[in-house]
Amino acid sequence: MNPAIQAYDDAFRIVQQTILHHDSMTGISFLTRVEFYLVQQSRQELHAMLSS
């Protein structure tokens, strides 16, 4: 696996866990959900770019 993808995935997982943790604690804002969705999109695009 490409080290750039690996590093991005590691960071992505940390963000994901943080959001899920906050979600269970307090209920997360809509805005944060939108931001998270955009991060997911950019991650998929990065994967596609680097693996082609």
Image: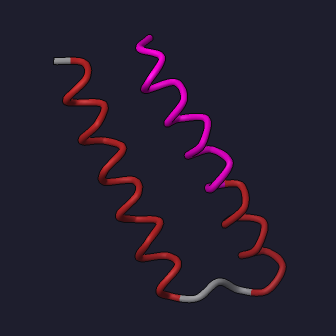
- Which residues, given as a range, are shown in magenta? 1-16
Residue 29 position within the rendered picture, expressed as x and y whole percent measured from the top left: 58, 88
Classify the position of the C terminus by image quarter. Answer: top left
Name the image quarter holding residue 16.
bottom right
Q: How is the image coloured?
A: secondary structure
Q: Is residue 4 magenta?
A: yes
Classify the position of the N terminus by image quarter. Answer: top left
- Judge from the rendering whether residue 6 lies leftward or rightward of residue 39; answer left or right: right
- Judge from the rendering whether residue 43 lies leftward or rightward of residue 3; answer left or right: left
Name the image quarter holding residue 10.
top right
Q: Residue furthest right?
A: 25
Q: Is residue 26 above or below residue 34?
A: below
Residue 42 position within the rendered picture, expressed as x and y whole percent measured from the top left: 31, 50
Q: Main secondary structure of the magenta part?
A: helix
**Point 72% across, 61% down: residue:** 18
Q: Residue furthest top?
A: 1
- Judge from the rendering whether residue 13 lies leftward or rightward of residue 6; answer left or right: right
Q: Is residue 50 above or below residue 12?
A: above
Q: Is residue 38 above or below residue 13?
A: below
Q: Is residue 50 above or below residue 38?
A: above
**Point 79% across, 86% down: residue:** 26
**Point 52% across, 24% down: residue:** 6
Q: Is residue 33 magenta?
A: no
Name the image quarter holding residue 39.
bottom left
Q: How many marks?
A: 0
Residue 5 position within the rendered picture, expressed as x and y whole percent measured from the top left: 43, 26
Q: Residue furthest left?
A: 52
